[in-house]
Amino acid sequence: MKRERKKAGSRFGRRVRLVNIKAIDWQAAHVSPASMVLLISFLVGILSGLSAVFLKWFIGLLGHYFKSGLNPCGPNLHLLCYPLAGILLVSILQRYVLRRDYSRSTYQLSVAISSGRYRMSLSSIWQSVLTCGLTIGFGCSAGSEGPVAYSGAAIGSNVGRWLGLSDQWLRILMGIGAGAGIAGIFKSPAGGVLFTLEVLQLPMQTIPVIGLFIACILSGTTAKAFSDFSFDMMFSSVKGFDPATLGWIALFAVFCGLYSILYNRLKNCAGRFLLSVDNAWHRNIIAGTSLSMTLFLFPCFFGEGMEVLQSAINGQGIDLFSYGPFAGSDIGVGAVLLGCAAVMLLKGPLVSAAYYGGGVAGDFMPTLFAGCFAGYFFSMGCSVLFGVDLPAWYFCLVGMGAVMAGTLHAPLMALFISAEITDSFQFMPAYLLAVTLSYITVKLLTPRAWNVETGHDDVLSLRELASTPALWRAARRHRLGLRGTGLDESIRKDGINGADKSRPDRNVR
């Protein structure tokens, strides 16, 4: 019986290989690689959208299960167990079952593209999504965009390999798949395109860019189709855009830039601390315990926090203390401000704990979360200190894009993701002002800082490209902690080693 099954399996494998060979021969004879990339973009876009849909569904399923039995009017001791259990479970899966590390998917994707590793394993498509779903579904405070971008890149790489495309085209398909993954998870086609072009900085000509647009549009449409064409954060505008608020928005944008610097420094300090712990089990326990303790005190940290953001931008305020030990207490404005400040300070380190401590997660969505709280804190603080009645929902909405631009060093991507995820393009002037001033503030105060996970910064990249493309490639590899660029001396002469020292050391294992 076993021999018959083995023979049947081998016959099926031979048939698949035969079909593969015939497909490669037909493609080589009738279709150019550029045209094939356009055709593949349709498939990659749909599959990446389905990957994002599954991840959202899986996270929602676990989150609903774990939150269904909680008491909103008092402390819930269950919250002390969920994140720790999730971190340990995902760590065991990666260490002993999957035997692969997906903890920092965005960084690994950037390294793979920069170092020429374009042939990704087929199992990466589902393993990164599964481990991310378990991490966030168990309540760890992080995002899901890095793993789904990694999954999309793996889809593009494997489809291209199956059709026999060269490494040059596999690199392009990885970028297309990664952008489609971002477009699907945020339902933001423009955000996905800009992730590939601005953050990953893949050099593309006209045909690949068209393929990227096709994949991102199809991925975003697929994700919307499976959610009744709704948005993750449904925004019903209370009022339209008011030009009279631009002065306050400018002041708030500077505040967001300052907070972005603090957010990154706290996040990187937590990352350095966890990397300094040599024992992997100790690192898992420290990270999981930290996530569990903060979740117990502030249950709004559970998962990605979409419900909290939707409530804030729709004028319903932020419920900081429900399901926690302070639920039902008579809490004044001062306590709410202190709670918002604590959440803002803790969010960055918690994200580091989620993926440096053994989980699998991303760091894009947490910046939107932090920006929303920054807007709420700023509007309430101005009301208390100066007696100015500022609409909290408005500053929560604008703050998401401003903090995302300052922390990720990608203002264009932040601009479109923050507008598309809430369908609030009517506030584009406010978004433009806030994103621009926030990023300028960051660059004026930390001119050599960059996004740790991608090695990216718009201003640094433009300066390096203005010199030579070779220097730009070498500098990017250097920022990602890679060696063997051949331009180390030039990099030191240009002062790139004098960058922001708050980033974790990439050579620490």
Image (cartoon, rainbow, N blue to C red):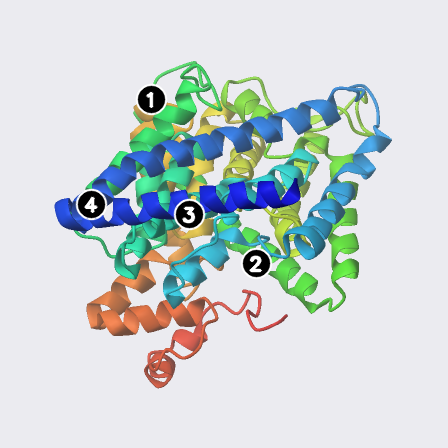
Looking at marks 1 and 2 on the same chain, the residue that comes earlier in the sequence is marked by 1
| Viewer can see residue 300 | yes
Q: Which residue is mark 2?
A: 265
For disc 1, the marked residue is: 241
Residue kind at label 4, given as amino acid type: Trp
Above or below, comparing residue 383 to residue 240 in the picture: below
Disc number lying in front (1 or 4): 4
The residues bearing labels 2 and 4 have C-alpha atoms spaced at a distance of 53 Å
- Determine whether 41 is above or below 119 in the image: above
Comparing 3 with 446, the one in front is 3
| In-image side of 79 versus 105 (left or right) | right
Judging from the image, what secondary structure is the residue with disc 1 in?
loop
Of labels 3 and 2, the one closer to you: 3
**Which disc is residue 26 wearing?**
4
Residue density around tag 2, few if under 14, some if 14–19, many if 20 or more, within 10 Å: many
Is residue 455 among what the camera can see? no
